[in-house]
Structure formats: structure tokens, C-alpha cells
Image: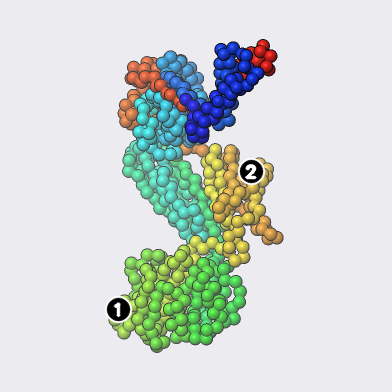
């Protein structure tokens, strides 16, 4: 069937014109007046055919073709090539005889089916592989890739030869419906459980701060009862920093949360171990390693005040007593430096009645830096209500004594019991006389107690707006609290704890480094290492067109250089096929004439995921077969699995009709016909003497 891009009536008119032209040439031309009528008809026909072919070809017609294809039913053989197959006593069988068995059975199947062989671990590849070097197992991904490759094909069955263990991807059970065919599972390995202890579900923060404690949580599981005490240990830099002995019962997991003090900066590696029992076969899951980056979280805090006040000295000493704070203080109207380098700005009785340095206040409000407002008698409350949108204070600038009432449901951070007792017994503060109306959702730590009456007016409260943290204390007189703390407790610990806790909460996750890197501190051997980077200028605006590279030093001290590629609002590089060991790196960036450098380390661990389980997971294999109307095949029946499949599959050949368009001008027969017509016409006219 021909298809044209132009209307049929135009093509028909052109063909009629070709016919009329042919008639005119051979019936009106005097040169052919004496020619026999039959010869004229033949010449007219030949000329009409050749002209018609040329006209049709000028309109670029396409020929609709249809091909009939007959496809036999398809069987896909999926072989698990992960290293867990070598965990079992009969592993030599799978490295030698198993491949021959597969080939013989698949040859029998190929008489009735098209058989495709694949092997997989965390990726899928063609053919059978008996090296069993895969570091991970992802059965669900293998199913998904097969479903994509054979979509809308005559897929009759999938044969899965595996031990059923997977450590990547989702439960393959949820992929069986997408395959829409029977799954025959060949059960490899041994599902008899051996007595085993293991550490599982390790949970920890990615970062911790120098001098603080951080938790490491994990579960200890056992599948047998034992009267033997088992010792758990945590090791850092070759030193045991925690140890404990436990009695462990079968199927009764023990959850541990251990607090570790961050005494060393940089990336720290912690090994969690539990000593094995006598003759334990699988000790690979008795150890887990975690990496935590310990940051010297030096927070830059700026205190701006309208006039000298004893509160300033009290706040400064409280914050400087902490290990992680660097405090800068200045009169508000005298400050003319950049504000973006600070993690927290404390505004004491700002805005005031002088209205000096208004542009600075606008820049502070617009910045991403956390803010802590502390009000007082010098505050201009009408202006305060305008510069922030969290609270409105209705007052005529009169002050009154208020006592704090602690909110027991306050969640952002927690004070010690001793600190709370100190606050509840502390001297009163000076707060504005009037109403306090919250305009945004806030978390409050203190409300006001006035003349022995608890009120709903908030005294100290917190909010987050557009990823910026705010704190507002509507009172002054903090210096009295510091003196009171020393009078009652002979230290300033409670006063310091309160304001260090407030500052730590407000500055949390406010990273002020110009070059910021995101990368895993540990990866398994065979995994791809990814690093993302962001670069900021002095005003902490993102730079998207810098030159950036990574210099990697491997365990043998060889250096390799990798370039970063821009990716939206970050830069990214990736490295594949890293061997196990400890790696050092330097990231260098250049923007205009400014150079920035940051270094670090990461570790590539020998992947032992496949050794975490020493018994096969036949339960999953049975579920896959049962859910898909397949069959679960044990090793005793491996020799005859082709017969089992043939007897259980009633699939027939599938007929496909494929249609496609081809250009008529490419048809050789059309050109032969055209040449033949022109040649015959020329021969006849030559014999007539009219060529």
C-alpha cells in the first residue's frame, strides 16, 4: 500500500497530464502519422508508464510493508553469581559441574523454547558465570531488567537459580506480578541455620561535635540460647573505648545505645564487635564499622548592643566558656563589617530609639544568619514589631518584674534538672508591661509569671522561618541570674548551660565554610564513590562556574586527578572500581583569582555483605514460585529441571505482524521497470527512424 504526503487529487491530475502528454506525442506528432495504430498504442503506454513513475517518485511516496514473525515461547535462565553461593559446603559443585548441567538442560529446552541466559549480582549480564565474585545481590533489579528487555514478548517462564539471599533492592516478591509468567526457582545452598551471633541495624549520626557525646545504637541478635557471656566492644584508633558483657537469648534481640565522647577531630572510625562463641562458623557478622565526622564546631557569634550593659559581659563569658564559640561584640552604631560569616547574631535592645545604622539592621534581617533578640528598657518596641513578623509587643515602654515559668513540653532542646531548678528559683527579669501577641507558630521555653500569677504571655520563645532560626527574649537583667547562680551554686554552670544550649540550637547545621563537600566516609569495595561540592563567595552566594578538581591519593600513595562537572547548583565527580584501603583527597577550586582547598579521607571496605548470612533463604524462593504458579526445585531434581519446566508450561508460539514504511524510490524493481520502459520505447522509435 502506497502512502503520499500530498493530496491524492494532485497526484491524479499529474498522472492524467502524463497520459494526455503521451497521447499528444504519438497521435498528434506528424512524425508518427504513418505509424501503425498498434505501435502507437504501445509507444503511448510505454511513455505513460515512465512519466507516471517519475511523477509518482517526485511526490515522495512511501510503501507500507508488513512482515510476519513467528516467535517461540521464551525462557529466561537467571543465575545468581554473587559470592554468597560459595558460603555452602557444596560450593565446588557450583564452580564445576553446575555449568554443564545448565547447558545440557537448556539445550533440551531450546528445542521448544528460545532460551536466554543471564547472570546477576547487583547488576545483570548475559551468559553463565561460575566465578561467583559478586559483592551484592539484587534479585528485584534482575527481575525488573528482564521485564524491560522482554516487554510485550512471548515470555513463558523465568528460571531463577539462587540461594534466595538478597542485600540490595526490595523484596523480589513484589516484582513477580510485573513479570507475569511462572518463576521456577532452583534452590542453591543449605537453609539449615547454624548457631550464630550478629550485630545488626547500626544507627548513628553522620557528624558529631568535638568535646560532645554522641550515641551509637545497634541490635544484637542470636538464634540460639547460651549461658556463655558475650563481650561487646567498641574500638577507635586501636583502643577499646567501651566494653560490656551480656547474656543473650535466642530470638530476643538486645538494643544498645552507647554514648561516646568525641575526643578526636576529623573522620573517626569505630569498630563494634561481639566476641564469637566456641566453634561459631560465621564471624563476619560479629563486627560492624561506622564512620563519624567529628567537627571542631567553632561557631562565630556576634553580639550587637545599643549601649553598654552588664548583660553583655554575662552573655559573653557564658558563651566563651563553651569550647565551640568565638564571640565578637560591638556597639551597634559602630559595627561596619560583613555579617554573613557569623553563625548567630545577638541583638541586645535593638532596635533602639536612636535609629542609627538602619541599613545594618535591614541587612541582618535579610540575611540567613540566626537571630537572637533580647529586649529591654532601651528597645523601641514599635520598631521591633516592624522588623520581625513573629510577635507583636503592645506596650508604652513601661517595664515590670517577671519570673520565668518553664514549659515542661518544650521540645527543641532539653536542660538539665539542676538548670531547671536554678531558673525556677532565679531572681526576676525586667520585661515590657503590656500584651504579647504571637503572630507565628512558636516553641516557647519560658512564659511570664507576674506578681505571683501565671500568664499566657511568652517570655522566651523560638521559631524557624524560611530556614532561619529565631529566638526572642523579652527581658533584660540576665547579669543578675549569673550572680545568683554563683551565689547559690558557687559556679556559673547553670547560667552557662542555658545560653550555650540556646546558641547551640540556633546555630545548628549552619555551615559557614566556603567550600562544602558531601561524600560517604565509607563505601564497600565495588561501589561507586560520589562527591558533591558547593562553592560560595565572601557574601556566601553560590558560585556555579568555578574550576574544580579532586586529587586522590590511593593506599599506595599514587595520585589521580578527577574533574568536577557542574550539576544544577553543585559540582559532582564519581570514581569507580576503587580497591579496598584508606584514601586521602584534596579538592581544589579556582574562581577568578581566588583559590580554595579542602582535604579529607574516606575508606573503601572489603565487601562482606555476602558473608553476613551463611544459610540460604529458601522461604523467599518458595514464595516467588508459589505466587507466580511456578515450581520450587531442590538440588535432587536439578538434573531434570528441563523436564519439570516442559511439563508445567503450556505456552504456544506467538505471531507478530510488524508494519513499517519504506521510501518507494529505494525499490530496485521500480527503477528496473522505468529503465525497461524507456529502453523499449527507444528501441521501437529507433526502428521507426524517429529516435
In the rendered image, the residue lying farthest to the right is 593
Residue 101 in the image: state x and y as whole percent: 45, 17
N-terminal of the two: label 1 or label 2? Answer: 1
Q: In this picture, is 50 found above or below 165?
A: above
Q: Secondary structure at mark 2?
A: loop
In the rendered image, the residue lying farthest to the left is 453
Q: Tell me, for residue 143, which label it has, or none.
A: none
Residue 21 in the image: state x and y as whole percent: 58, 25
Q: Is residue 83 visible?
A: no
Image quadrant of residue 144?
top left
Q: Disc 1 marks which residue?
A: 454
Task: State the separation of the CA atoms marked 1 and 2.
Answer: 65 Å
Image quadrant of residue 338?
bottom right
Q: What is the crowding at mark 1: few (fewer than 14 residues within 10 Å), some, or many (at least 20)?
A: some
Q: Tell me, for residue 554, which label it has, or none.
A: 2
Residue 373 in the image: state x and y as whole percent: 46, 76
Residue 553 in the image: state x and y as whole percent: 65, 46
Along the line of sight, the residue nearer the viewer: 690 or 271: 690
Quarter of the image with the C terminus is top right
Which residue is at a point 59% across and 12% down the rendered structure image?
Answer: 36
Which residue is at a point 39% across and 50% down the rendered structure image?
Answer: 256
Amino acid at each position: 500500500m502506497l502512502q503520499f504526503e500530498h493530496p491524492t487529487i494532485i497526484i491524479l491530475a499529474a498522472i492524467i497530464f502524463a497520459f494526455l502528454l503521451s497521447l499528444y506525442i504519438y497521435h498528434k506528432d506528424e512524425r508518427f502519422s504513418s505509424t501503425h495504430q498498434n505501435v502507437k498504442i504501445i509507444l503511448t503506454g510505454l511513455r505513460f508508464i515512465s512519466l507516471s513513475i517519475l511523477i509518482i517518485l517526485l511526490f515522495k511516496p512511501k510503501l507500507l510493508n508488513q512482515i510476519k514473525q513467528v516467535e517461540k515461547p521464551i525462557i529466561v535462565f537467571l543465575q545468581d553469581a554473587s559470592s554468597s553461593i560459595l558460603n555452602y559446603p557444596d560450593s565446588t559443585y557450583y564452580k564445576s559441574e553446575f555449568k554443564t548441567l545448565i547447558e545440557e538442560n537448556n539445550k533440551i529446552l531450546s528445542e521448544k523454547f528460545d532460551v536466554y541466559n543471564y547472570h546477576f549480582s547487583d547488576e545483570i549480564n548475559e551468559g553463565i558465570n561460575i566465578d561467583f565474585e559478586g559483592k551484592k545481590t539484587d534479585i528485584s533489579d534482575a527481575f525488573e531488567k528482564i521485564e524491560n528487555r522482554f516487554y510485550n514478548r512471548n515470555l513463558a517462564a523465568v528460571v531463577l537459580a539462587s540461594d534466595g539471599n538478597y542485600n540490595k533492592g526490595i523484596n523480589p516478591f513484589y516484582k513477580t506480578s510485573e513479570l507475569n509468567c511462572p518463576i521456577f526457582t532452583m534452590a542453591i545452598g543449605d537453609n539449615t541455620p547454624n548457631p550464630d551471633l550478629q550485630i545488626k541495624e547500626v544507627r548513628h549520626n553522620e557528624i558529631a561535635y568535638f568535646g560532645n557525646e554522641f550515641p551509637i545504637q545497634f541490635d544484637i541478635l542470636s538464634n540460639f540460647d547460651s549461658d556463655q557471656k558475650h563481650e561487646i566492644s567498641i574500638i577507635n584508633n586501636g583502643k577499646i573505648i567501651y566494653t560490656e558483657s551480656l547474656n543473650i537469648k535466642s530470638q530476643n534481640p538486645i538494643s544498645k545505645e552507647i554514648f561516646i565522647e568525641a575526643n578526636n577531630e576529623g573522620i573517626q572510625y569505630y569498630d563494634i564487635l561481639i566476641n564469637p562463641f566456641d566453634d561459631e562458623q560465621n564471624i563476619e557478622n560479629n563486627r560492624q564499622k561506622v564512620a563519624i565526622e567529628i567537627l571542631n564546631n567553632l561557631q562565630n557569634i556576634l553580639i550587637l548592643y545599643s549601649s553598654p550593659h552588664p548583660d553583655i559581659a554575662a552573655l559573653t563569658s557564658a558563651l566563651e566558656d563553651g569550647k565551640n564559640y568565638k564571640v565578637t561584640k560591638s556597639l551597634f552604631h559602630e559595627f561596619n563589617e560583613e555579617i554573613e560569616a557569623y553563625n548567630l547574631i545577638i541583638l541586645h535592645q535593638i532596635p533602639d530609639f536612636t535609629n542609627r545604622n538602619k541599613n545594618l539592621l535591614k541587612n541582618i534581617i535579610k540575611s540567613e544568619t540566626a537571630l537572637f533578640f533580647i529586649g529591654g528598657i532601651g528597645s523601641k518596641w514599635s520598631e521591633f514589631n516592624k522588623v520581625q513578623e513573629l510577635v507583636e509587643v503592645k506596650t508604652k515602654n513601661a517595664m515590670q518584674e517577671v519570673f520565668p515559668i518553664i514549659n515542661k513540653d518544650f521540645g527543641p532542646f532539653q536542660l538539665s534538672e539542676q538548670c531547671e531548678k536554678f531558673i525556677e528559683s532565679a531572681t526576676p527579669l525586667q520585661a515590657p508591661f503590656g500584651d504579647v501577641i504571637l503572630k507565628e507558630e512558636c516553641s516557647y521555653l519560658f512564659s511570664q509569671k507576674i506578681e505571683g500569677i501565671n500568664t499566657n504571655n511568652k517570655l522566651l520563645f523560638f521559631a524557624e522561618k524560611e530556614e532561619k532560626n529565631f529566638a526572642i527574649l523579652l527581658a533584660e537583667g540576665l547579669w543578675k541570674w549569673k550572680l545568683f547562680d554563683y551565689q547559690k551554686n558557687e559556679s556559673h554552670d547553670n547560667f552557662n548551660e542555658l545560653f550555650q544550649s540556646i546558641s547551640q540550637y540556633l546555630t545548628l547545621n549552619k555551615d559557614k565554610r566556603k567550600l562544602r563537600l558531601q561524600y560517604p566516609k565509607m563505601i564497600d569495595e565495588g561501589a561507586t564513590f560520589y562527591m558533591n561540592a558547593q562553592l560560595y563567595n565572601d557574601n556566601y552566594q553560590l558560585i556555579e562556574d568555578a574550576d574544580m578538581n579532586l586529587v586522590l591519593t590511593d593506599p599506595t600513595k599514587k595520585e589521580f586527578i578527577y574533574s568536577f562537572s557542574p550539576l544544577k547548583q553543585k559540582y559532582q565527580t564519581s570514581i569507580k572500581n576503587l580497591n579496598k584501603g584508606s584514601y586521602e583527597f584534596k579538592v581544589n577550586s579556582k574562581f577568578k583569582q581566588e583559590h580554595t582547598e579542602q582535604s579529607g579521607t574516606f575508606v573503601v571496605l572489603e565487601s562482606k555483605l555476602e558473608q553476613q548470612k551463611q544459610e540460604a533463604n529458601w522461604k523467599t524462593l518458595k514464595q516467588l514460585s508459589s505466587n507466580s504458579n511456578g515450581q520450587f526445585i531442590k538440588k535432587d531434581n536439578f538434573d531434570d529441571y528441563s523436564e519439570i519446566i516442559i511439563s508445567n508450561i503450556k505456552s504456544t508460539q506467538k505471531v507478530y505482524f510488524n508494519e513499517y514504511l519504506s521510501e518507494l524510490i529505494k525499490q530496485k524493481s521500480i527503477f528496473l521497470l522505468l529503465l525497461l520502459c524507456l529502453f523499449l520505447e527507444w528501441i521501437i522509435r529507433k526502428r521507426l527512424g524517429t529516435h
